[in-house]
Amino acid sequence: MTRTRPRIAPIPGTPPCGPPTVDPRTGCTLTRYADVRAALAAPACHVPAARPGAAYTLDWFRGLVSRFSPPEDHPARRAAGLAALAPLDPDELRAEAARLTADALDRAGGRLDVPAALARRVPVGVLAGRLGLADPATAVEAVTTIAAAYQPGADAAAVWRADGAVTVLVALAPPAPPEVLANRLGLLVQACDATAGLIGAGARHLLPPPADPPPPADPPPASGEVTGSGCPAGDTEKLLHEVLRLDPPVRGTRRTTTGAVHIGGVDLPVGTPLLLRFDSANRDPAVFPEPGSFTPGRPTPALTFGAGSRGCPGQRHALALATGVLDVLRERCRLAPGVPAYEPHPLLRVPIRLEVVPR
């Protein structure tokens, strides 16, 4: 029998991979793998810093987390987040996420909406409990509200709701100095939408399709090959690395030049806004042969978690939490008929509806 590997089309709106494009109104967009990595590593390409605000508001929170910190404050704040993660065993996170997912499926008894029941509730709830928050279920609601306004440009109503949610989250957390507290809670907020998006993408690409599958075939398929059930075979975590490349929950990030920079053959002056497109760079044919092919085990990592000093501090933990959820979904469920719906966001890909049914 002929084995096949799935091909995953680019997400709608993904720019083609090519040289930097410069628009005098919006700045420079980088789509090639080497160019995006260069910008992530360049000392003169900075994350736009957030200004501090009144205590226990969204501005206070954003002004203290490492994600939006200026270079002089970033190392210490990142270290605070890493210290909070250090005691957490990813294998234990994976096991707890699997247990909670199984419990949710047992309660549902049938059709289940992954975004509503699992994608945020399980990973954020597990992480909140392990970080010592008093009421993980309440923390999930507060974190979700904050995440909706976390990125710059949120509307006033979302910011107002997030201000109240920050107060709730702080009250649930063990006491700590402001920078330590904010960066412990920042782990939850940064994990919220990105991990939900990864779980949604994993469910979409790793679960059997709605139609009745053909009978299984021998010999056993290699990792990533489509099985008799119509989905890729192999260890969930290894498969997720390829999901992250082809259907990234975080499609890009922003930087601003604070000095003259030369990237991809283009000279960029001080103050140039940069848009780094992970979704395009992850399909760079110069780095990933047959870029649309679902091929686990590629030697070069995707850029979805970032790179360099500002790469995601909780990459192992996020993968473990998503893997725990998807281990159970792959064992017990298949996709329900219907087309997934996604939240409208230029750089995040998070489903708002993606249903599964028992096999």
Image (cartoon, grey):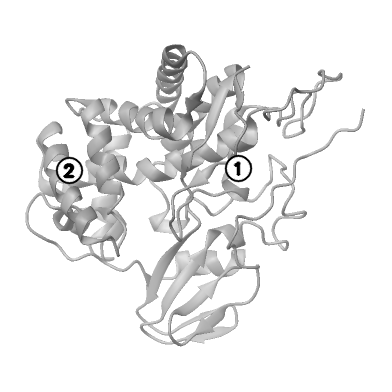
Does residue 301 appear anywhere in the picture?
no
Which residue: 33% across, 26% down?
A: 126
Left or right for 301, reference 312: right
Question: Residue 301, relative to residue 232: is it above or below?
Answer: below
Q: Amino acid at mark 2?
A: Ala
- The image shows residue 129 at horizontal and vertical percentages of 26, 25
Residue, far left = 55
Which residue: 43% across, 80% down?
A: 26
- The image shows residue 220 at horizontal and vertical percentages of 81, 21
Which residue: 10% across, 44% down?
A: 177
Q: Of residues 182 and 202, which is closer to you in this image?
A: 202
Does residue 260 appear anywhere in the picture?
yes
User: Label 1: few (<14), some or many (≥20) within 10 Å?
Assistant: many
The answer for how far apart the CA atoms under marks 1 and 2 are is 32 Å
Q: Which residue is mark 1?
A: 243
Residue, far right = 1
Residue 93 lies in quadrant: top left
**Circle 1 or circle 2, nearest the eye:** 2
Quarter occupied by the C terminus: top right
- The image shows residue 166 at horizontal and vertical percentages of 16, 45
Q: Which residue is mark 2?
A: 165
- The image shows residue 274 at horizontal and vertical percentages of 44, 74
Left or right for 225, reference 210: right
Q: What SS does tag 2 mark?
A: helix
Left or right for 309, reference 338: left
Q: Amino acid at mark 1?
A: Val
Which residue: 47% across, 70% down?
A: 275
